[in-house]
Image (tube, rainbow, N blue to C red):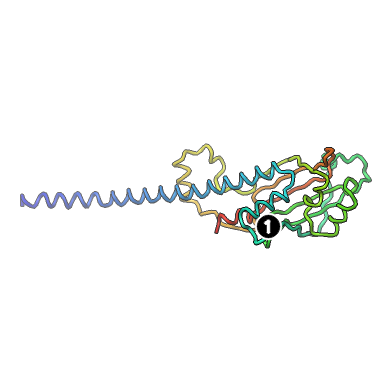
């Protein structure tokens, strides 16, 4: 009996340590999964922030989207086309002030489009523009073709002044910047993975479009869609 004690003790120790080792392995696997899920979400967040920053700094959203489409291979040909959407939305009094409209009779044209690259809808844009401040040639292009507004007005040397930018989709929880790393990784491991939805909106920008002389010619409200980051879900 005395000689068997070490064997019994070893078996008992093994019986105790095996579940502990398994638990440790499960914790390590969970931490690894949490770190991987968090890394994916951080990459998505950085990508959307880069997209917002680029659109906020550009003078032409159309040209920026075209370059983005080509850089990330969103379509075989990196060309943005404006797909017209019927409808009419009147200007508000605040918008009239922002556009510096002093004559109540000055005409305003509403143009709603989807900006498309290949078969991907990258953004939806509401545009209130002032035809009297454009050339006849530009007005003809805007009314008679699928040319995006930004490309049509390039001869005017336009610039943009951002009025607002609103986030509509996030890969991370609200206040994630203040969460401890372990807590954030735990949340990422437990939360469902972000899913791709081509109809989902990432953020909305409002901006004034100005001529070279600083005169407003348009106010735009642009909603940017998830196909802009589709390559992260492939």
In the image: residue 166, left or right of residue 2: right
Q: Residues within 10 Å of mark 1 (few under 14, many from 20)?
A: some
Q: Secondary structure at mark 1?
A: loop
Q: Quadrant of residue 205?
A: top right
Q: Position of residue 128 (x, y in %)?
A: 82, 49
Q: Quadrant of residue 214?
A: top right
Which quadrant, please, contains the C terminus?
A: bottom right
In the image: residue 84, left or right of residue 194: right
Give the residue at x 85% y 42%. Answer: 96
How many marks do you count on the picture?
1
Give the residue at x 59% y 47%. Answer: 47
In this rendering, the answer to whether 234 lies above or below 42 is: below
Q: Position of residue 60 (x, y in %)?
A: 74, 47
In the image: residue 69, left or right of residue 135: left
Give the residue at x 30% y 52%. Answer: 22
Q: Position of residue 106 (x, y in %)?
A: 92, 45
Give the residue at x 74% y 43%. Answer: 59
**As rendered, which of 205 and 133 lies closer to the eye?**
133
Which residue is label 1 attached to? 78
* Residue that extends furthest to the left in the rendered view of this protein: 2
Q: Position of residue 142 (x, y in %)?
A: 84, 55
**As rendered, which of 61 and 170 lies closer to the eye?**
61
């Amino acid at each position: 009996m005395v000689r068997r004690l070490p064997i019994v003790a070893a078996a008992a120790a093994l019986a105790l340590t095996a579940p502990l080792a398994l638990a440790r392995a499960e914790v390590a696997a969970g931490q690894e999964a949490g770190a991987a899920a968090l890394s994916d979400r951080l990459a998505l967040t950085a990508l959307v922030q880069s997209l917002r920053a680029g659109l906020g700094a550009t003078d032409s959203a159309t040209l920026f989207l075209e370059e983005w489409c080509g850089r990330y291979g969103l379509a075989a040909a990196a060309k943005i086309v404006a797909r017209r959407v019927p409808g009419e939305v009147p200007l508000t009094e605040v918008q009239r002030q922002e556009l510096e409209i002093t004559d109540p009779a000055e005409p305003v044209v509403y143009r709603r489009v989807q900006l498309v690259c290949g078969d991907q809808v990258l953004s939806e844009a509401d545009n209130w523009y002032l035809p009297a401040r454009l050339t006849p040639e530009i007005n003809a292009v805007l009314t008679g073709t699928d040319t995006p507004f930004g490309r049509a007005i390039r001869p005017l040397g336009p610039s943009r002044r951002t009025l607002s930018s609103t986030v509509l989709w996030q890969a991370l929880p609200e206040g994630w910047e203040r969460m401890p790393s372990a807590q954030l990784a735990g949340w990422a491991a437990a939360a469902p993975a972000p899913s791709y939805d081509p109809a989902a909106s990432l953020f909305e920008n409002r901006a004034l479009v100005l001529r070279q002389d600083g005169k407003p010619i348009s106010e735009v409200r642009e909603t940017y869609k998830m196909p802009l980051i589709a390559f992260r879900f492939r």
